[in-house]
Amino acid sequence: MSDKQIELLTQGRRGKSDSLHLLIMDLHKQINHLSGELASEVIDGANVWDLLDSDRGRVVAFMRGLNRTAYLKFDHPGLETAATRDGEHLLLQNDIGTNDAHVLVIQVTGFEISLTYSDLHRQRLAFFQAMLTPLGAVWSDLTSQTSASLNAGEAYSVATAKFVCTDEDSLDKALEGIASRIVFLIDWNHARKRLKAFVKKTEATAILSEVANLDVGHRAWVQVGGERIIFAAMQAAGEGAFRIGDRLDEVIGVEDAHAFLVAVMQLSCDALRTGQPAALVADETRMLLAQYVRHRTSEFDLLTEHSSYCHALAQAISDSLAHGAETSNKAAQELAARAKTWERKADHLVIQAREKADRQPRWRPIARLVEQSDNVADSLEEAAFLISLIADHQKGWNDDVTKALSHLAATVLQATQDYVKALAIARTLGSDSEAVDNEDFLAATWQVLQAERHCDGLLREARRVILKKLKDAPSLMLANDLAIALETASDYLLTAAYTLRDVAFDKTGVKE
């Protein structure tokens, strides 16, 4: 047979042509319909016939799990269950949805459960496997009924699982657990594809797993509008928050995007369960996203993180000089290595600020400010490097030189602390700020100015000491370079403080 003939024989798309596969599925549906008509009784919604008395409790356990979560499919069809006895086996079958190849068959023999599951989507099958594994499922290797090159990629996959139980109670718990998970397969791939507009593939699956574990599911979210309510919330988030093509996790971060989407699915489920309109979910989604945007994309979060690296650098240099690191090669090398790591992390924040400024106009002054603040980090990292060189070439170094440089480093540290304080106050300022907050902010920036002027004088004093006490040319040069690097950091702190004033005045509506 040719590939074309095999494809026509096995294809499952209606309207293309008839096939053996479609015939089998049609017969399957007719058998299900007939079985419902022939059912001798109904047990908690399951059509059953020819059961033994010992089977009834097991069917009840299965339906208890199914009915506990079945409402989460809302208006979607599916979850019809049939049960019968076949020799030594109790057979339970659930038609999950409307898909021909999406079928679950369970065979119970003694205290052992054998489950066969077929699905068009391998990702959903893997999702189901992950849900049942904690219940004791041991899965067989996955098999495919056709190759991927045939049937336009519409081949379906089949897997089986075994549950070995010890008694009737553990068997009932396994059946109940299996049944309670089935509803989360309905529309699963539909939801996953829509989530991919906001997060990566793996994260979309993780979200669907979490809402299943929470017994919330995704069907309500799909029914109330799915991706449309998320896009509408992103559009309403405010000027510059999102651009066309932005993915949610790229703007508010992976963790917050995950938490937000889970929360929206919970809102959707609660709304449909209590009869609330979809419009309410849309409104709540907009409000929730606005909170995440304010929390995650706060410009001052990035500025604060960057300033923490500047402070760490200034603190480490001041402590090192105070404890003689310039005379200890090991301590000086460790200082230089730490400083380089902090400086690189600070650089990454500059890159983030620039990227945000490209997308969101309100980030442009912040990007300028963090760039100026990064000059502080660069100068301090250079100072740490110079200390490591001094430790290698110290000749004639004495306490007077150390004292002069330590005094300069301590003043730079104090200026850095004042800048950090000003930044902390600035993030709380607004048009309704208290007068005392405004005064504290201006006082902190004024302290940075005072420190910069003080550093100018300390640099000159340090040079006098260096020229007087050091006679070795390399040591003299390195000590002078260290003093310049520290004083330069104070200059950049002053520039950053002035830019911060502009940003703060803009927040409060003050015109200079």
Image (cartoon, grey):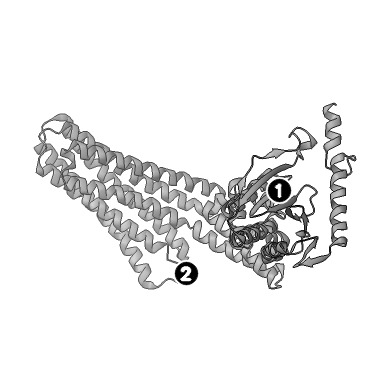
Relative to 343, residue 85 above or below: below
Q: Is residue 487 left or right of residue 350?
A: left
Q: Position of residue 45 (x, y in %)?
A: 77, 66
Q: Position of residue 121 (x, y in %)?
A: 71, 45
Q: CA distance from mark 1 to mark 2?
A: 61 Å
State the image quarter where residue 23 is shown: top right
Q: Residue at x 22, y 34 (%)?
A: 389
User: Which quarter shows the N terminus?
Assistant: top right
Task: Name the foreground residue: 195 vs 170.
Answer: 170
Labelled disc at residue 117: 1
Q: Would you call the spot at circle 2 few (<14 residues within 10 Å), some (14-19), or many (20 or more)?
A: few
Of mark 1 and mark 2, the one earlier in the sequence is 1
Q: Is residue 37 left or right of residue 52?
A: right
Q: Residue at x 35, y 52 (%)?
A: 308
Is residue 96 something one can see in this rendering? no
SS under mark 2: loop
User: Which quarter shows the C terminus?
Assistant: bottom left
Q: Position of residue 107 (x, y in %)?
A: 71, 52
The kind of residue on which mark 1 rests is: Tyr
SS under mark 1: strand
Q: Residue at x 75, y 32 (%)?
A: 149
Q: Position of residue 131 (x, y in %)?
A: 61, 53
Task: Name the foreground residue: 100 vs 143.
Answer: 143
The kind of residue on which mark 2 rests is: Ser
Q: Is residue 199 left or right of residue 106?
A: left
Name the residue beneath numbered marker 2.
Answer: 431
